[in-house]
Amino acid sequence: MNQMQQMLMQAQKIQRELVKAHAELDQKDYVVKKAGIVEVTLKGSKRVASIKIEKDALTPDNEEMIEETIAMAINEAVETIKKESDAIDEKLTGQKGALPF
């Protein structure tokens, strides 16, 4: 086996490992609780799975605060997912961010 074939096989192995690791990440739940009134669950695929709001907080006076709290919780979950995704890429490839394959 020549050197080019070995490099190609190594790249294919890394690609398979990346696909597997990211598929596992996509299935994972990320739960963020904020201010004791909001709980947001996102999948690793960054899809919102659920949003729970404490019933006592649901008053017209709290509308803006609840909206801001939900946004903060979603943003925090997305950032956590991105960090885990980057860590997977860096562990398997030695660099952050998605590879072009």
Image (cartoon, rainbow, N blue to C red):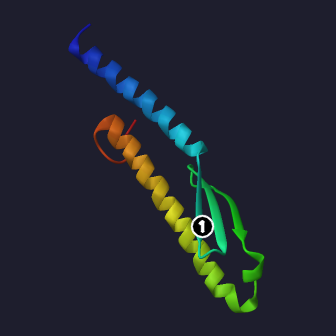
The correct choice, above or below, for 60 with respect to 45 in the image is below
> Which percent across, then down, holds residue 45?
57, 49
> Which percent across, then down, holds residue 27?
60, 43
Quadrant where the C terminus lies? Answer: top left
The residue that label 1 is drawn on is: 33
> Which percent across, then down, holds residue 64?
64, 86
Residue at left offset 28%, top offset 16%: 6
User: Image quadrant of residue 57?
Assistant: bottom right
Secondary element under disc 1, as helix, strand or loop, is strand
The correct choice, above or below, for 101 with respect to 87 in the image is above
> Which percent across, then down, holds residue 89?
37, 42
43 displayed left or right of 53? left
User: Image quadrant of residue 47?
Assistant: bottom right
User: Image quadrant of residue 56?
Assistant: bottom right
Q: How many marks?
A: 1
Return the residue found at the far front: 36
Question: Disc 1 residue type?
Answer: Lys
Q: Nearer the viewer, residue 39 or 47?
A: 39
Residue at left offset 46%, top offset 60%: 79
Q: Nearer the viewer, residue 3 or 56?
A: 56
Residue 92 makes an appearance in the image:
yes
Quadrant where the N terminus lies? Answer: top left
Residue at left offset 69%, top offset 86%: 63
Return the residue found at the far top: 1
Residue 98 makes an appearance in the image:
no
Q: Neighbour class for label 1 at 10 Å: few (<14), some, many (≥20)?
A: many
Return the residue found at the far left: 3
